[in-house]
Image (cartoon, grey):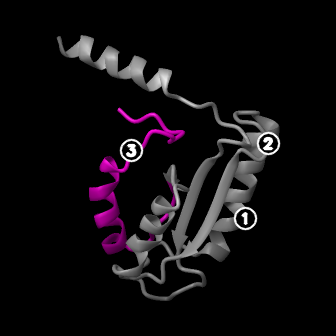
């Protein structure tokens, strides 16, 4: 019975799936501190938008050109300053969710900003999301 239910759920998700395109892009948010911050307890890996952006740009370019995983310009990357704050950081993701511009989160250097988002995001599914979640 459980397998049948999972199959029905999978078919429902496939039927409502919208292919990734320029019209229906994958909205990716990168919530990290804007600049390098020397607070090892808050940012143990020393991540910042200034350090991560070139790496993500190369990965996106490879996804478009080298591997052709998705059509060109079908990923909308948004970089937002999390300020390494447990109050401001989660709100960055919530603001994108309210704008219906959130399919994927890459980041959160500060675990206390990540924790509430990790607890809430399983409930953030909507009808026009490009991501199938099981």
Q: Look at discs 3 and 2 and give the one toward the viewer.
A: 3
Q: Is residue 120 left or right of residue 50?
A: left
122 is within the stretch colored magenta: yes
Magenta run includes residue 118:
yes
- Please report whichever mark, 1 or 3, sits nearer to the chain's N-terminal start: 1
Q: Secondary structure at mark 1?
A: helix
Label 3 to label 2, Cα distance in Å?
Answer: 25 Å
The residue indicated by pointer 1 is: 54
The spot of residue 41 in percent (x, y) is 35, 82
- Name the residue rendered at 73%, 65% in the picture: 54
State how far apart marks 1 and 3 are (Cα). 30 Å
Q: CA distance from mark 2 to mark 1?
A: 18 Å
Q: Residue at x 34, y 22 (%)?
A: 9
Residue 59: x percent and y percent?
70, 50
Badge 3 is on which residue?
Answer: 125
Q: Nearer the viewer, mark 1 or mark 3?
A: 3
Residue at the disc numbered 2: 72
Instruction: Give the number of callouts.
Output: 3
Residues marked 1 and 3 touching at CB (< 8 Å)? no
Quadrant of the drawing holding the N terminus = top left
68 to 76, vertically: above or below:
above
Q: Earlier in the sequence, mark 3 or mark 2?
A: 2
Which numbered disc covers residue 130? none
> Which x, y percent locates residue 110?
39, 74
Nearer to us in this view, 105 or 124:
124
The answer to which image quadrant residue 13 occupies is: top left
């Amino acid at each position: 019975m459980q397998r049948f239910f999972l199959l029905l759920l999978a078919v429902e998700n496939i039927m409502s799936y919208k292919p990734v395109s320029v019209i229906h892009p994958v909205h990716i948010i990168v919530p990290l501190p804007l600049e390098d911050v020397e607070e090892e307890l808050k940012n143990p890996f020393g991540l910042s938008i200034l350090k991560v952006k070139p790496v993500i740009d190369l990965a996106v370019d490879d996804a478009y050109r080298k591997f052709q995983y998705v059509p060109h310009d079908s990923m909308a990357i948004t970089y937002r300053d999390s300020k390494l704050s447990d109050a401001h950081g989660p709100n960055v993701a919530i603001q994108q969710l309210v704008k219906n511009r959130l399919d994927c989160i890459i980041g959160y250097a500060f675990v206390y900003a990540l924790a509430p988002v990790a607890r809430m995001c399983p409930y953030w599914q909507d009808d026009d999301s490009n991501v199938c979640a099981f």
